[in-house]
Image (cartoon, rainbow, N blue to C red):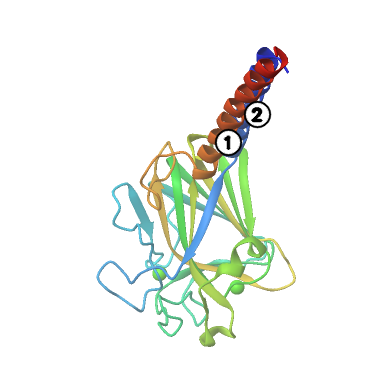
Amino acid sequence: MSFKKIACIAALSLSAISSFIYAGSAQAISFKMTTGIAGPNGETNQGAFSEFTKLPGTTTINFNDGKVPTTGFAKYSFENTSGTSSVRSDVWAPPGVKDTDINKSSYLAVFNGDKVTINLDGYLNYFGIDWGAISANNTFSFYNGNTLIKTFTTADVNPVAPTHGSQQNGEGSGYVHFYSNSTNDIFNKIVISQTSTNGGGFESDNHSFHSGTDRFTGFDPKAVPEPSVILGMLTVGGMFLRKRKNEKLQSVSQSH
Ligand SMILES: [Ca+2]
Ligand SMILES: [Ca+2]
């Protein structure tokens, strides 16, 4: 194989890796689930709060005035065909850090095919939500304007719920954090819905929004490429060098 051919193959491999990196970041909102933390003043009867509540650029909505905000940074609107979705206070409120930390405050409940759309005044790279009494068909959708970026459902997120509270028929709960991995994945509209009309509700509290137009650095402050990508590039580089060496050896032996 000629040096030119090898160089060409190496270049192609590198460009394949580059396009993989690009494709990988083109559609990437990730999520993590944690127990969350107590309220800003240590409250344990208000549901769980985001670990990023005090991060500069974070706004938190706790629904404790009994209604959704319709003005300001985050504007909520109901598509309430069932007439039962509302801000309320009852035993189905998402619990606190421990599933025995009963939430006595108001929270948001969405039922029976209804939706709540949250329009933001600016771009976000993070959305956190205390999610309780987890039911099938709870759905989270993230948009940039009218373009859907990513949808998550109960099936995606529930398997890693940290608690399954005895207070709520053993249904899961936890604080779920959605975050952008790149500037391609920032969002300015969120729709939360209970897409089934066959029972189950979507109960949540303490929504936290972090403003940003690039990747969210809260979980991983260092902006470095993934280790696997670096390893891939080293492997390609190594193959290229080895092939060159072999070829040199071959030419030497042929000349004798
Ligand atoms: Ca609340
Ligand atoms: Ca539920």
Please report the residue visible at 47 percent of the width from the left and 61 percent of the height from the top. Answer: 129
Label 1 neighbour load within 10 Å: few <14, some 14-19, many 20+: few
Q: Which mark is residue 145?
A: none
Please report the residue visible at 60 percent of the width from the left and 26 percent of the height from the top. Answer: 240
Residue 85 in picture, x, y percent from top left: 58, 66
The quarter of the picture where the N terminus appears is: top right
Please report the residue visible at 73 percent of the width from the left and 67 percent of the height from the top. Answer: 197
Q: Between tags 2 and 1, which lies in front?
A: 1
Of helix, strand and loop, which one carries label 2? helix
Question: Residue 81 or 232: which is nearer the viewer?
Answer: 232
* Amino acid type of the residue tagged 2 in the rendering: Ala
Tell me if residue 225 comes above or below residue 100 in the rendering. Answer: above
* Amino acid type of the residue tagged 1 in the rendering: Thr
- Tell me the quarter of the picture where residue 116 sits: bottom right
**Residue extending furthest toward the left:** 41
For marks 2 and 1, give the CA distance.
Answer: 13 Å
Please report the residue visible at 32 percent of the width from the left and 46 percent of the height from the top. Answer: 57
The quarter of the picture where the C terminus appears is: top right
Residue 14 in picture, x, y percent from top left: 60, 26
Label 2 neighbour load within 10 Å: few <14, some 14-19, many 20+: few
Tell me if residue 28 comes above or below residue 245 in the rendering. Answer: below
Residue 249 in picture, x, y percent from top left: 64, 21
Question: Residue 125 or 209: which is nearer the viewer?
Answer: 125
Residue 233 in picture, x, y percent from top left: 55, 33
* Residue linked to disc 1: 235
Q: Is residue 45 left or right of residue 3?
A: left
Of helix, strand and loop, which one carries label 1? helix
* Residue linked to disc 2: 16
Q: Earlier in the sequence, mark 2 or mark 1?
A: 2
- Tell me the quarter of the picture where residue 98 sits: bottom left
The verdict on label 1 being within 8 Å of ligand 2 is no
